[in-house]
Image (cartoon, grey):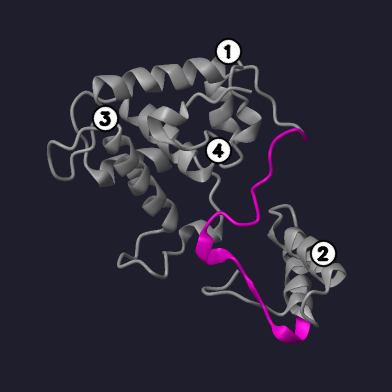
Amino acid sequence: MPSPLEPSVVGCRFDSPQGMCVMTLLMVLRQYRGPRTKADVIDAIKLEGWFDLLPEDLRRYPQGNSNEPRWVTLVCWARNLCADHGLISRDQRDAWESTTEGKNQAVKISQHFRENIADLRKCWWWKPEKKRELNPGYTPSSGDALRPPYVYEDSIPIFRRSVRGREGNRASDERLAKLLAEYRNPNTTVERRDRLREVLELSFPEGP
């Protein structure tokens, strides 16, 4: 399935977290004439209900200097990426505005989803309502991609030695991987997740 974002343009997959941030940003900015502040754009993304956010999305990056939610940080990185490729202007400070090429790219993105050239089911971070806006024929199904276990690098867990057992125990590692995947599945109940936390004895930089 072709991607609506050519790697030569932005250098990221359309179904990656960064790719979805890029597409969201371009489609939101396309609505405006003239620049908007960062706060305006972030508020618009929230009000329009693009992302299906979980608690881990709302924590900050531990290595960052900002207290902003990490999903906002990803959007800011997407803005810089777009600016590097001439899709967003850098003429003014705190002025987020699409260039002509950026608006054209937003049209292309919308067209590819509407015409099923790109598969909306792969965009696991977008809410079903937004997917339906992009393609009225979209219906949530078991074919929709699930949120991956690790969206942020600092969310990768560290197994305690007592749980991992001997070094190189492949069977043990595979079992732990399955349990961890269940733990990270958004459909896992809170009660089951609490039990898995105890079994895995996970240690996270900022909690799971």
Q: Is residue 197 left or right of residue 120?
A: right
Q: Tell me the residue that label 1 is attached to.
A: 115
The amino acid on which the numbered mark 4 sits, given as a three-letter code, is Trp
Q: Earlier in the sequence, mark 4 or mark 2?
A: 4
Viewer-side residue, 123 vs 174? 174
Q: Position of residue 195 (x, y in %)?
A: 78, 73
Q: CA distance from mark 3 to mark 1?
A: 26 Å
Viewer-side residue, 127 vs 198? 198
Q: CA distance from mark 4 to mark 1?
A: 18 Å
- Position of residue 23 relative to residue 158, above or below, is above
Eye-nearest disc, 3 or 1: 3
- Position of residue 39 relative to residue 174, above or below, is above
> Where's the C terminus, which quadrant?
bottom right
What secondary structure is the stretch in magenta mostly built from? loop
Q: Is residue 181 left or right of residue 74?
A: right
Eye-nearest disc, 2 or 1: 2
Residue 158 among magenta residues:
yes
